[in-house]
Image (cartoon, rainbow, N blue to C red):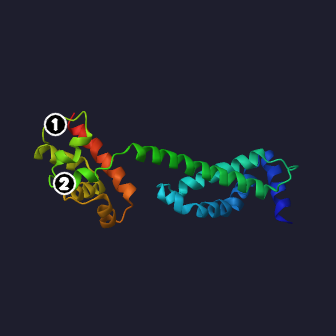
Amino acid sequence: MNNEKLDEELLKEVEEENTDALEELITKYSPKINGIINKYKQKAHTLGLDTKDLYQEGLIGLIKAIKTYKQEKDASFKTYSTILIEREILDSIKTNDRIKYKTLNSAISLDNYLETEDNSLYSFVSDTRNTIDSDLINEEEEEELKKQLTEFELKVFELKMDGKTNNEISLILDKNTRSIENTIQRIKIKIKEINK
């Protein structure tokens, strides 16, 4: 029995609410989902997307294909499902891409502020903050901040305080520059919280 006929039979069984047939179709098309994910793996990784999340998106595309496929269509179920699976995965990537760049475009680079001789915590935020009291942040507040930072944020913070640029930090910590910039934004938010 060829694959198209097997698909047609399984689809009929799914219409009759046969859960085994549905599971069989999902198992059969799971490698297809993974193959499409591999096509976009690099882009997804850049956006911080987990392949498990992309697999779920691909699965949604497959389920949509199973529910909406009509056998009188010109395309086979394999072709039709591939299109829907890829569309769901791409939509997820594009959505995350928009969110990421919206965040990055509203972020302010701190390199200019931290390449000066005055590398105090105050200089870390003073020129970019409107709501923070202009008094210097004392050692006690700096200790409080360090308690609130994650291990990675603390490393970035300390490297910034040592006068390192974002590019230098990205090389030292083996992370991309965007990741470092995002971490700095999170640190700034925590600083603002301490100074409320």
Quarter where residue 115 is shown: bottom left
Is 156 placed left or right of 80 in the picture?
left
Quarter where residue 25 is shown: bottom right
Asked if residue 20 can be seen in this view, the reply is no
Is 84 placed left or right of 132 in the picture?
right
SS at mark 1 in the image? loop
- Residue that mark 2 sits on: 116
Q: Is residue 168 above or below residue 186?
A: below
Disc 2 to disc 1, C-alpha distance? 18 Å
| Residue type beneath disc 2 | Thr
Residue visible at 20% across and 50% down? Answer: 146
Residue visible at 28% across and 44% down? Answer: 188
In the picture, the disc for residue 173 is none
Q: Position of residue 84 (x, y in %)?
A: 70, 51
- Residue that mark 1 sits on: 134
| Residue type beneath disc 1 | Ser
Q: Is residue 32 above or below residue 61?
A: below
SS at mark 2 in the image? loop
Quadrant the C terminus occupies:
top left
